[in-house]
Image (tube, grey):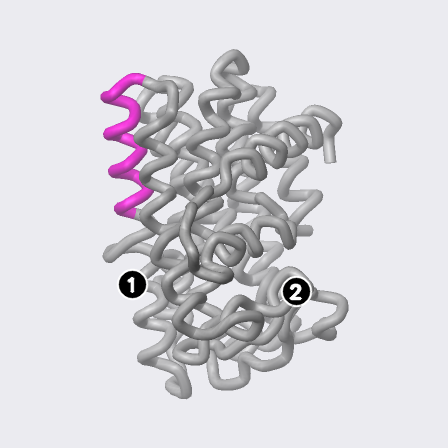
Amino acid sequence: MPEHSKKLLEAFEKFLQANLPQIESFHPHYGQALCDMFKAGGKRFRPLLLLEVVYAYEPLMLPAANHIAAAIEMLHTYSLIHDDLPTFDNADLRRGEPTLHVRYDQVTATLVGDALNSHSFFMIANAPLGSDQKVALVKELALNGGAGGMVLGQAIDCYFENQKLSIDELTFLHINKTAKLIAASLKMGAIIANLPQETQELLYQIGLDIGLLFQIQDDIIDATMSPEEAGKPTQNDGAKNSFTNLLGIEGAKSQKVKIIDEIETKLYDLEDTLRENLHNLIEYYLK
């Protein structure tokens, strides 16, 4: 990972840990449960995508951008907490730590997810940015993380479990469940940096491709790694519509190479610094 990316992550992590929800109450563990998933670590991939866009175009905006990067990480974390519940994947491990419903109970995990969903928008509202920017950022996060984005993808994923989808249907599923929030991360960075609309849309399209690449990589990890290596349960997606189940491991790897080539082509329309930085992140996280 480039040195500047490490510094962006270090500054973001410091900001995130200092700005986790602080709730005073007599509940024995609710306040702690709000913070557990963040203290367990994580790739912080979505926040870093946003910060790389701001770094490339408006580096003086990085302190303000950390508020929005934290909002995205909180929304993403809520989705992981809910995804791990017995209602969905019934996972007992996340980021190498017990999932919240295992550590506490299902009620706590569900409510913590709900709280982080709401708190992500509180983070945007409190960011030191103009009102028009904040409205645009709220809209983008809600569109891609909500009813017509991540939640739609989850609904399709659950409903069609044990039913084989076509490659087009599988792609639609994962564009919504995974790729749209990644695409929104890039576009929201562009909104903070006041980039032209056409650049915002180009970054969004690149983000959709990166999101699909991210999902294929995750499916390959699930099919080929142990839980200890991955830091979460693996080899348990036999009933799910994954790229490895549909295409096989080698077919998924071929699809991954194809998408990387498509991303590299689109990157050439970006400013040199951002093109190089995104290329390096793909190399580091996804190749």
In the image, residue 140 sits, relative to residue 213, either above or below, namely above
Q: x%, y% of residue 242?
A: 50, 73
> Is 131 one of the magenta-colored residues?
yes
Q: Quadrant of residue 190?
A: top left
Q: Tell me where the magenta segment starts and ends, as one range.
A: 130-143
| Residue 157: % across, % down | 37, 73
Residue corresponding to mark 2: 97
Foreground residue among 78 and 169: 78
Q: Residue at x 42, y 43 (%)?
A: 183
Please identify the dominant SS of the magenta region.
helix
Return the residue at label 1.
Answer: 152
Q: Position of residue 96 (x, y in %)?
A: 68, 64
Q: State how many labels appear.
A: 2
Question: Is residue 47 shown above or below 143?
Answer: above
Q: Amino acid at mark 1?
A: Leu
Q: Residue furthest top?
A: 60
- Residue occupying image coordinates x 51% and y 47%: 210
